Image (tube, helix red, strand yellow):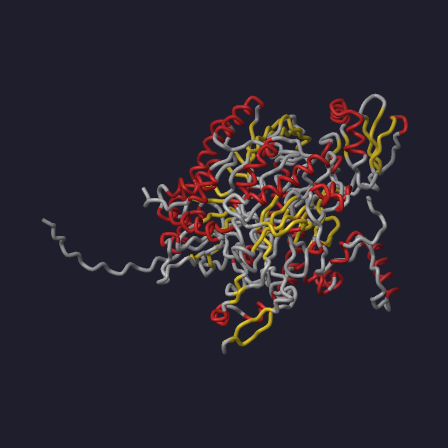
Amino acid sequence: MAQVEAPVAPAKPAAPKTPRRAVESGVPDNWQFLHPLMKKNYGQWKYHDRPRPGVLHHVAKSGDELWTVKAGTQRQMDVWTIRKLCDIIDKYGEGHVRFTIRSNVEIGVSKWEKVEPLINALESAGFPVGGTGNSVSMIAHTQGWLHCDIPGTDASGAVKALMDELIDEFRKEEMPNRVHLSTSCCEINCGGQADIAIIVQHTKPPKINHDLVANVCERPAVVARCPVAAIRPALVNGKPSLEVDEKKCICCGACYPPCPPMQINDPEHSKLAIWVGGKNSNARGKPTFMKMVASGLPNNPPRWPEVVDAVVNIVNVYAANARKYERMGEWIERIGWERFFKLTGIEFTEKHLDNFTHATTTFRSTTQFKF
Amino acid sequence: MAKPMHETPMLDELESGPWPSFVTGLKRLAKDKDYMVDVLGQLETSYETRKGYWKGGTVSVFGYGGGVIPRFTELKDENGNPKFPDAAEFHTLRVMPPAGMHYSTDVLRKMADIWEEHGSGLIAFHGQSGDIMFQGVKTDKVQDAFDAINELGFDLGGAGPAVRTSMSCVGHARCEQSCYDEAKAHRTIINNFLDDIHRPALPYKFKFKFSGCPNDCMNSVQRADLAVIGTWRDNIKTDEELAKKWFAKHGMTELVNDVVARCPTRAIQVKELKDLRQGPKISTVAINDTHGLEIDNADCVRCMHCINVMTGALAHGDDTGATILCGGKRTLKIGDLMGTVIVPFMKLKTDEDREQLVDLAKRIVDFFAENALEHERIGETIERIGLVNFLEGVGLDVDPNMVSAPRTNPYVRTDGWDEEVAKMQAKKKAA
C-alpha cells in the first residue's frame, strides 16, 4: 500500500540570494606556483642544454641545476587526466608544473636521478615525452565543433590524427630546426602563424537565410565587415536582408560571425588549405608570414587522411632538404619557391598569385632565378 | 552512473593511436555525467554531418560583461527541442592564467574539483589567447562555478571588444635569455586594465603579449596589438669556459656553418686569437688555445641565433629592456600586419619603468577607444590614419628605428621641413 505523504506547508519564497560580488583580482601572482629553484634563481639563470630529447637542463649563476621534463597533452583535459598528471608530478616530480604555449607540460626536478623515473611514469601513463629543440612540437589549435560557434571543422580531432603520425618527430630532435604547427577551423586563423598551418578555406559564397537576417543581423556592420565590399543591403521577398555579389565574394566567411544566417560552412565546399613558412622569432631572418601552398583538401573526419598525408609529406621533404637551423620559411627562402613546389610535388596555380592588399610585395621583380 | 552512451563510431576512431586522446577523456567524464553523454552525442553528429551546432548568446556573471563564452545547442528535432537535451547549454569560462602558466599540483587539483562539481569536468590548458578554458557549464551553474574559481584567486579573462587575456613566456623563472621580468610586466599592465577586460566597450579586441627576448616565444609580433619583446643595448657577454666547452663538443665545422654563417648581419667572425680586435663595441671570447670569436656589436641586430646555439657562452648584455611594437594581427580585414616598432627601447627594471609602460599602454588604449572604427584593430587604425598621426596621438617621438626604410614616394607636404629638422635637433640636445 502506498504511503500517504503528510501535506507539506507551502514553502515561503526564498529571499532572493544576493549575488556574490567578484573580487577583481586579475592575473594571479605566479610566485605562489613557482618551483622553489625558480624562485631562488629568478632572473639569475646562466645557460641550458638538452641532455636528451624531451629534457632541458638549466644551470643558474648560483650553480643550482634544474631539469625539466616536457611532455605532450591532449590540451582538452578531463579532470581524471588532470589528476593523473598531478599524481605523477607529486610522486616523480616536485609538485610544480608549467604549460607551454603549445599545451605541453614542463615538470621541473632538482636532481638528474629523478628524470628517468619521471619520463617512464609519463610515458607509461600515455603522455609522450618530447617537444624540445629541433622537434615537431604539439599543434597550437582552436576549438572546432566541440565548442566554437562558427567552425568549419573540428580542431582536437584533426590534431589527434596528425600527432598520431608525427609523434616520433615529437619524441626525437631530428628536424633541421623546430617545427611549429597550427590548425584553425575558419579563416580567422585563431591557431596562428606557423611553420605549417592547416586552415579551413571555404569555396562557395554564404547561403543566406533571408527570413532571419533582419532580426538577427546588424546589417550595416555586416556590410562593413566584408573585405571586398561584396555585401549590400537588399529587400528580399519584401523583407530587409543582405545580398552578396557572388562574383566579388572571396568566401572568407567574415560575414558569418556577425550574421549567422549567412551560412558559410558547407560539408562539401568548406575545404582545408595548407600554409607554410610562418615564423615569429627574430632569430636569423626576420619574422615572416606564412604562405598558402595547397588548398582544396577535403574536410574528412574523423582522421582527415588527405590532410595528414599532405602535412607529413611537407615535413619529410623539409627534413630531407633543409640545413641545420633553417626553419621551414628560411629553407624555402634559400632554395626558392619554385624548387619548393617541385620537391613537394604541390602544383603551383594561378590561385597562388596574391591579389589582395600588399600583393605586389609578393611578386618577383628581379632576374635572380635558381634555374 | 550516467545514462547509456550514444553510439559514437567516428569519435571512437580517435581513441586509437599513440597521442593522448581527448575522446577517451570525454568518455570518462560521460560515465558519471548525462551532460557529457549528450556532448559526445552532439559532437558525433558534427563529425557525421561536418557541421557545427553551437550558437552564442548572453550569459555572464554578476558585475561583469564578458569572460563567459555562451553556447546553446542548435541541434533540434522537428518540434524545436534539443536532440541532446542534457547538452543544450555548454558555456565556457575564460580564466586568466598566472604569468608563465606556472601551477602547483595543489591548485590544479582544486580547479579539477571545482569543475567536476559545477561544470563538465573538461578544462583546456590553454586557449589561443592564453586563457584556462573551463569548458562546459550550464547557465544556472555559471555563477557558482565562477565564485569558486574566484575564491581560489583566479579571475575571468577577456572576450569580445575588450582588452584580452595576456600571455608571457617562462622568462625570468627559468630562462637565461630573459631580458626583463615578464611576469611583473604582464601582471602590472593587465591588472591596470581589468575594467576594460571585464566590461567590453572598445571598438574591438586589444591584446598584449610579453616575450622576454627576440625569440618571441609568445608569438607577439604577429598576434598582439601591443607586443613587449625583451632586448638589450650593450654588448653581448661571453663566457670563456662555456665557449671552450661548446667548441670541444661541436668543433670548427659546426661553429662556422651553424653559428658564424648564420649571423644575419655578419657581425660575428672566427679569428686567430692574436687577431681579435678590442674596442667599446667589440665582444670576444676564446674557443680554444688558438681561435676565438669576435662580435662587432654595432652590427649585431640582437636576433638571438648565436646566443640560442651557444647558450651561456654568449649571452645578452646587462642594459636590458624591451622593444614595444603595436598593431600585429591576422588577415581580417585589410591583410596581415606585423607589429610596428613604436618604442625601440624601454627600460623595464624598476616599478617606475613599468609605470611608464602602463602609462603608454593607457594612452594607446584610450586612443584606440576614441579613434578606431567599429571592429577595427589598432594596426588597421594606424594603416588608415598613418603612423605619424598615431604617434602624435599617443605622444611618442618619431625615431629612425621605427622604419625599415624611409618613404619611397614624394607624396608628402614638405613645407615645414626646416622646422621639423630644428625640432629633432632640439630634442637631441635636450636628451
Of residue B352 and residue B379, the one placed in the foreground of this image is: B379
Left or right, A80 with respect to B239, comes to left
Question: How many marks do you count on the picture?
Answer: 0
Q: Quadrant of residue B61?
A: bottom left
Q: Residue at x 75, y 32 (%)?
A: B314
Residue A228: image x %, image y %? 65, 65
Of residue B240 and residue B248, the one placed in the foreground of this image is: B248
Q: Which quarter of the image is occupied by the N terminus of chain B?
A: top left
Residue A136 in view of the camera: yes
Residue A276: image x %, image y %? 67, 46
Residue B333: image x %, image y %? 64, 61
Up/down of B132 relative to B374, above or below: above
Left or right, B10 with respect to A9, comes to right
Residue B352 in view of the camera: no
Left or right, B279 with respect to A83, comes to right
- Residue ranking furthest to the right: B275
- Residue ranking furthest to the bottom: A238
Of residue A95 and residue B42, the one placed in the foreground of this image is: B42
Residue A24: image x %, image y %? 50, 53
Of residue B278 and residue A318, the one placed in the foreground of this image is: A318
